[in-house]
Amino acid sequence: MPISRPLAVLLTVAAATTALSATSAAPASAAPAGTSLRVKVLKLTNAERVRAGCPKLTANAALAKAAQRHSVDMAAHEFVDHTGSNGSTLVRRAENAGYTGWSALAENVAGGQRTAAAVVKSWMRSPGHRANILNCSLKHLGVGYAKKPGTEQVTYWTQNFGSKF
């Protein structure tokens, strides 16, 4: 059964001044099928935004790196949460991946959905996740996708959204 965290996280700050320590994260795996799924999530997310009158999100490599690392972590440790297995937060993961100078960050996580369409549909049915997708002030997106090691069916998804000053 697909799982989506019912509460999405949105952080907005006047200035990103906190220096955060580096964290070790599982290496990002980028299987061709996973890459295609990540692109489809971006396209489907942008289609929802356009229908709502928001501008399209731009793919961001640093947010994608943070999202992929988080999805790999969730898959390796079999959990769905905004806090990483090592206690990392969205802020820490995004900054460690190189997304600095941000004014807003948001994250959607989910597990169990087997297709890009299924995960976006799941997020759109959840008020908190939908709010992140349709937040017109967010400009960038990185998508992560991973499977539980040794399986083809247990999937983990992350969307990291951001805007910069």
Image (spheres, rainbow, N blue to C red):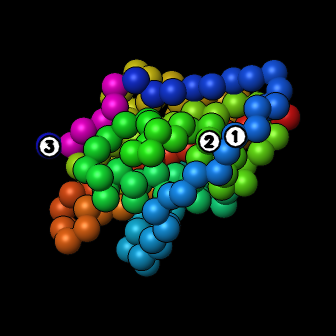
Figure quadrant of residue 97: bottom right
Q: Residue at x 41, y 68 (%)?
A: 34
User: Mark 2 near mark 1, Cβ–Cβ under 8 Å?
Assistant: yes
Q: Amino acid at mark 3?
A: Met
Q: Position of residue 118 (x, y in %)?
A: 29, 48
Q: Which residue extends farthest left?
A: 1
Q: Secondary structure at mark 2?
A: helix
Q: Quadrant of residue 55?
A: top right
Q: Which residue is mark 3?
A: 1
Looking at the picture, how far across and down is residue 3, in whole percent? 24, 38
The kind of secondary structure element at disc 3 is: loop
Q: Counting other residues with Cα less than 10 Å from the Cα at mark 3, is it few (<14), some (14-19), or many (20 or more)? A: few
Please tell me which residue is depicted at 76% across the width and 32% down the height of the picture.
18
**Residue 126 falls inside the magenta stretch:** no
Q: Which marked residue is nearer to the observer: mark 2 or mark 3?
A: 2
- The residue lying furthest to the bottom in this view is 32
